[in-house]
Amino acid sequence: MELIVASGDREVRVEAEAGADGNWTIAVDGREYRVDAATVGRPDVLSVIVGGRQTTASVRALGKGVYVVDGAEVRVIDPRSRDFAAAVAQAGDGVFEATAYMPGRVTAVLADEGEHVAAGQGVLVLEAMKMENEIPSDIDGRLEKLLVEAGQTVDSGDPLFVVTPTGDDTAG
């Protein structure tokens, strides 16, 4: 499985493959590591052996794809979502890709993928700084892809959804 792991401004591509022996082979930016991990006493404390060296790590889940590892916030991103949004954004004129304007949490999704949305129509609700903000589509079109779900935390600039323009014959 391929993932993007981000902490602060740093992002790395990680490939993980489970071995038959219960260990993992982890490739970080192309460099492979043999990893064995097990909980130690509490479910949020891991004993980790990487390349024969043992250490412990405190890992706590904050929300979907967001963890605190030894005090540092780490995000795990599915690169397929990011790649899809980038491809659609480059594909044609008039495509609208909504991004989070600040860190927050998605509290509601107001439209379904494939649904027609009008310019100004709210597609989702983002809670930021204790205020709920409806994030609208800037164009009339088809909600091509929702890239988040209710309850998910997002950072500033994270893609939220993609709307592709519709012709006059499909509007309405």
Image: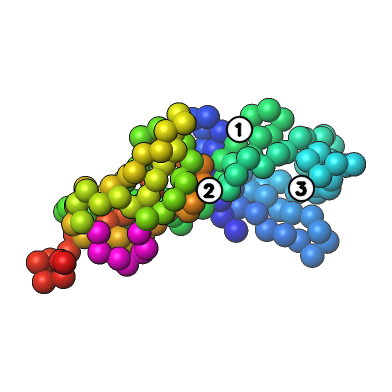
Identity, as a three-letter code, of the amino acid under mark 3: Val
| As drawn, 17 above or below 38 | below
- Mark 3 element type: strand
Give me the C-alpha separation between circle 1 and circle 3: 21 Å
Circle 3 residue: 35
Q: Earlier in the sequence, mark 2 or mark 3?
A: 3
Identity, as a three-letter code, of the amino acid under mark 1: Glu
Q: Which mark is residue 151?
A: 2
Within 10 Å of disc 2 (Cα), the crowding (few <14, some 14-19, many 20+) is some
Within 10 Å of disc 1 (Cα), the crowding (few <14, some 14-19, many 20+) is some
Q: Nearer the viewer, residue 70 or 61?
A: 61
Q: Earlier in the sequence, mark 1 or mark 3?
A: 3
137 lies left or right of 37:
left
Residue at 35% in and 35% down: 101
- Mark 2 element type: loop
**Which residues, given as a range, are shown in magenta?**
111-117
- For residue 113: magenta? yes
Tell me, yes or no, if residue 13 can be seen here.
no
Residue at 47% in and 31% down: 130
Give me the C-alpha separation between circle 2 and circle 3: 31 Å
- Quadrant of the image for the C terminus? bottom left
Q: Which mark is residue 102?
A: none
